[in-house]
Image (cartoon, rainbow, N blue to C red):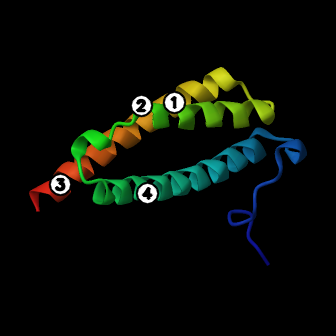
Amino acid sequence: MTSPLNAAPLKPEDCNTMQEVRAGVNAVDARLVALLAERFGYMAAAARIKPERDMVRDEPRKAEVIAQAVAQAEALGMPGNVIGEMWETLVEGSIAYEMARFDALSKD
């Protein structure tokens, strides 16, 4: 038997209390952080693979990534402008992380 603390969260449309909503949000947040950790793993790989530091910042690729996220969000009925802002922050943070990793690898 699964305890209520370990139970899978309800789908949003099945929630009837704020406790159920918060449990769902917490579960989604935990999955998002795990996915972000995986994404940052790819940034670490990019830092290892790219031969030059000036290759870390790639503005055309950045624009492509953000545009793809906005398009996907809008296709799902989400506000593209909000997702665009979030992805701007995500990509800039990823670039900073990759640069730091590149610099650390270059010192070795």
Q: Nearer the viewer, mark 2 or mark 4?
A: 2
Q: For the residue labelled by badge 1, is the local secondary structure a helix, a strand or a loop?
A: helix
* Three-letter amino acid code of the residue under disc 2: Glu
* Three-letter amino acid code of the residue under disc 3: Ala
Residue at the left extreme of this rendering: 107
Q: Residue 17 occupies which quadrant of the picture?
A: top right
User: Looking at the image, which residue is at 35% across and 57% down?
Assistant: 44
Q: For the residue labelled by badge 4, is the local secondary structure a helix, a strand or a loop?
A: helix
Judging by the rendered image, the residue that carries numbered circle 3 is 104
3D distance between C-alphas at marks 3 and 1: 26 Å
Numbered mark located on residue 63 in the image: 1
Label 1 environment density (alpha carbons within 10 Å; few <14, some 14–19, many ≥20): some
3D distance between C-alphas at marks 2 and 4: 18 Å
Rendered position, 78 above or below 49? above
Position of residue 54 measured from the top left corner of the image (x, y, whole percent): 25, 39
3D distance between C-alphas at marks 4 and 3: 16 Å
Q: Earlier in the sequence, mark 3 or mark 1?
A: 1
Q: Nearer the viewer, mark 3 or mark 2?
A: 2
Q: Are marks 2 and 1 in contact (CB under 8 Å)?
A: yes
Judging by the rendered image, the residue that carries numbered circle 4 is 42
Rendered position, 4 above or below 18? below
Numbered mark located on residue 31 in the image: none
3D distance between C-alphas at marks 2 and 1: 6 Å
Q: Nearer the viewer, mark 3 or mark 1?
A: 1
Judging by the rendered image, the residue that carries numbered circle 2 is 59
Compared across the picture, whether 4 is left or right of 101 comes to right
* Three-letter amino acid code of the residue under disc 1: Ala
Q: Are marks 4 and 3 in contact (CB under 8 Å)?
A: no
